[in-house]
Amino acid sequence: MRGDVVRYDAVKGYAFVAADELDEDVFLHVNDLDFDKSLLAVGTVVDFTHEMGERGPRALSASLISSPVAEAVQAAMGGGPSREHAAPPSSAPEGHHDGYADVLSAAELRTEVTEKLLAAVGDLTARQVLAVRTAVEQVARRHGWLDA
């Protein structure tokens, strides 16, 4: 069954998923995720199996279909702008590159990534922003995109 995360409490480690086929939201604990919990946020779409528990439907497992966190990471990595914040068209021809690139300090990269994440997905938790930012910085260091 497929559903959208409609509520998420990162501190307590649970979410509620709404599915068209069910009359009530399904309880989902982070221990039942088949993906990294840092990708979980309101708006995440999951496939899940469930059972009826004492207090209502409870997910047994959930796999990731799409995540606003993953989309924000993609946008921050230059994999394309988010739907809400499309970049203005460039005057440069498609695929044009002048052979030069800005090299940023780690602090400049962190600032740019944080601002991009908050603009793309405003309801990310601080922990999610830090996790994404750290991952982007690691990629940038491996590729030599940062000042030494």
Image: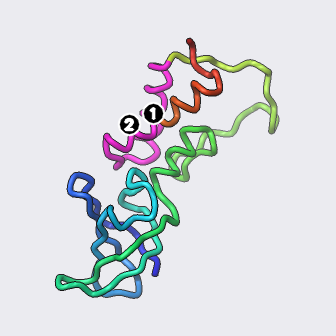
Q: Is mark 1 on a helix, strand or loop?
A: helix
The tag on residue 134 is 1
Q: Which of 92 and 106 is in front in this view?
A: 106
Q: Position of residue 127 (x, y in %)?
A: 33, 42
Name the residue rendered at 17%, 82% in the picture: 55
Name which residue type carries label 2: Leu
- In the displayed structure, would residue 125 be above or below residue 40? above
Find the distance from the CA under tag 2 to the CA under tag 1: 6 Å
Badge 1 density bin: few <14, some 14–19, many ≥20, Cα 10 Å: some
Instruction: Say which mark, if any, is on residue 60.
Output: none
128 over 42 or under it: above or below? above
Q: Main secondary structure of the magenta part?
A: helix
Viewer-closest of 40 and 99: 40
Q: Report the quarter where the C terminus lies.
A: top right
| SS label for mark 2 | helix
Look at 48% across and 32% down and name the residue there. Answer: 113
Judged left or right of residue 85, residue 79 is right
**Mark drawn on residue 130:** 2
**Magenta stretch encompasses residue 121:** yes
Give left or right: position of 93 versus 87: right
Magenta part of the chain? 106-134
Q: Quadrant of residue 24?
A: bottom left
Q: Position of residue 13 (x, y in %)?
A: 26, 58
